Image: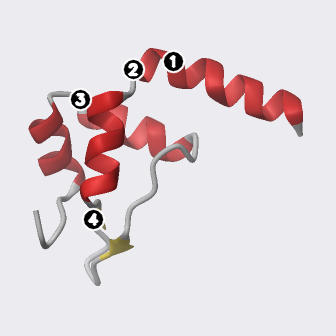
Amino acid sequence: MTAGRTVGQLAKAVGVNVRTVRYSERLKLLTPIFRRPSGYRVYGEHEEWQLRCCDPQEWRGASIWRSSQQ
Protein backbone atom coordinates (compact mmCIF):
# COMPACT_ATOMS: atom_id res chain seq x y z
CA MET A 1 0.00 0.00 0.00
CA THR A 2 2.01 2.95 -1.22
CA ALA A 3 -0.52 5.66 -2.09
CA GLY A 4 -2.76 5.16 0.94
CA ARG A 5 -6.43 4.30 1.14
CA THR A 6 -9.59 6.35 1.35
CA VAL A 7 -12.12 5.74 4.13
CA GLY A 8 -14.11 3.29 2.01
CA GLN A 9 -11.05 1.42 0.77
CA LEU A 10 -9.64 1.14 4.29
CA ALA A 11 -12.93 -0.08 5.73
CA LYS A 12 -13.31 -2.70 3.02
CA ALA A 13 -9.70 -3.91 3.35
CA VAL A 14 -10.00 -4.32 7.11
CA GLY A 15 -13.56 -5.62 7.12
CA VAL A 16 -15.22 -2.90 9.17
CA ASN A 17 -17.96 -0.40 8.46
CA VAL A 18 -17.08 3.06 7.10
CA ARG A 19 -18.79 4.49 10.19
CA THR A 20 -16.25 2.64 12.36
CA VAL A 21 -13.38 4.42 10.62
CA ARG A 22 -15.08 7.81 10.97
CA TYR A 23 -15.98 7.12 14.60
CA SER A 24 -12.38 6.26 15.44
CA GLU A 25 -11.25 9.49 13.80
CA ARG A 26 -13.79 11.49 15.81
CA LEU A 27 -12.35 9.96 18.98
CA LYS A 28 -8.87 10.95 17.75
CA LEU A 29 -7.77 7.32 17.82
CA LEU A 30 -7.16 7.23 14.09
CA THR A 31 -5.75 10.09 12.03
CA PRO A 32 -5.54 10.34 8.24
CA ILE A 33 -2.03 10.89 6.91
CA PHE A 34 -3.35 13.68 4.68
CA ARG A 35 -6.39 14.96 2.81
CA ARG A 36 -6.56 15.12 -0.95
CA PRO A 37 -7.48 18.45 -2.58
CA SER A 38 -10.97 16.97 -3.05
CA GLY A 39 -11.23 16.58 0.74
CA TYR A 40 -10.95 12.79 0.84
CA ARG A 41 -9.13 11.44 3.87
CA VAL A 42 -6.18 9.18 3.07
CA TYR A 43 -4.96 6.60 5.56
CA GLY A 44 -1.62 4.82 5.64
CA GLU A 45 -0.36 1.41 6.70
CA HIS A 46 -0.22 2.34 10.40
CA GLU A 47 -3.90 3.25 10.46
CA GLU A 48 -4.76 0.01 8.68
CA TRP A 49 -2.76 -1.91 11.29
CA GLN A 50 -4.58 -0.10 14.10
CA LEU A 51 -7.97 -1.12 12.72
CA ARG A 52 -6.86 -4.72 12.18
CA CYS A 53 -5.34 -5.15 15.64
CA CYS A 54 -7.63 -3.17 17.89
CA ASP A 55 -11.19 -3.98 18.85
CA PRO A 56 -13.38 -0.91 18.19
CA GLN A 57 -15.47 -1.83 21.26
CA GLU A 58 -12.40 -1.16 23.41
CA TRP A 59 -11.95 2.33 21.94
CA ARG A 60 -14.99 3.69 23.71
CA GLY A 61 -13.47 2.74 27.06
CA ALA A 62 -10.13 4.22 26.03
CA SER A 63 -11.70 7.55 25.10
CA ILE A 64 -13.67 7.70 28.33
CA TRP A 65 -10.52 6.94 30.30
CA ARG A 66 -8.58 9.62 28.40
CA SER A 67 -11.22 12.29 28.99
CA SER A 68 -11.33 11.48 32.72
CA GLN A 69 -7.54 11.93 32.91
CA GLN A 70 -7.64 15.47 31.52
Q: Nearer the viewer, residue 16 or 2?
A: 2
Q: Is residue 53 above or below residue 37?
A: above
Residue type at numbered disc 2: Asp
Res. 6 image quadrant: bottom left
Q: Position of residue 68 (x, y in %)?
A: 85, 28
Q: Which mark is residue 42?
A: 4
Please name the residue that numbered disc 1 is placed on: 58
Res. 63 image quadrant: top right
Q: Residue at x 29, y 43 (%)?
A: 49
Tag 4 or tag 3, which sits nearer the N-term? 3
Q: Which mark is residue 55?
A: 2
Q: CA distance from mark 3 to mark 1?
A: 16 Å
Q: Cβ–Cβ below 8 Å for labels 4 and 2?
A: no
Q: Quadrant of the N terminus?
A: bottom left
Please name the residue that numbered disc 3 is placed on: 17
Q: Cβ–Cβ below 8 Å for labels 2 and 1?
A: yes
Residue type at numbered disc 4: Val
Residue type at numbered disc 1: Glu
Q: Cβ–Cβ below 8 Å for labels 3 and 1?
A: no
Q: CA distance from mark 4 to mark 1?
A: 24 Å
Label 1 sits on a secondary structure element that is helix
Q: CA distance from mark 2 to mark 1?
A: 5 Å
Mark 1, Cα crowd under 10 Å, few <14 / some 14-19 / many 20+, is: few
Q: Cβ–Cβ below 8 Å for labels 4 and 1?
A: no
Label 2 sits on a secondary structure element that is loop
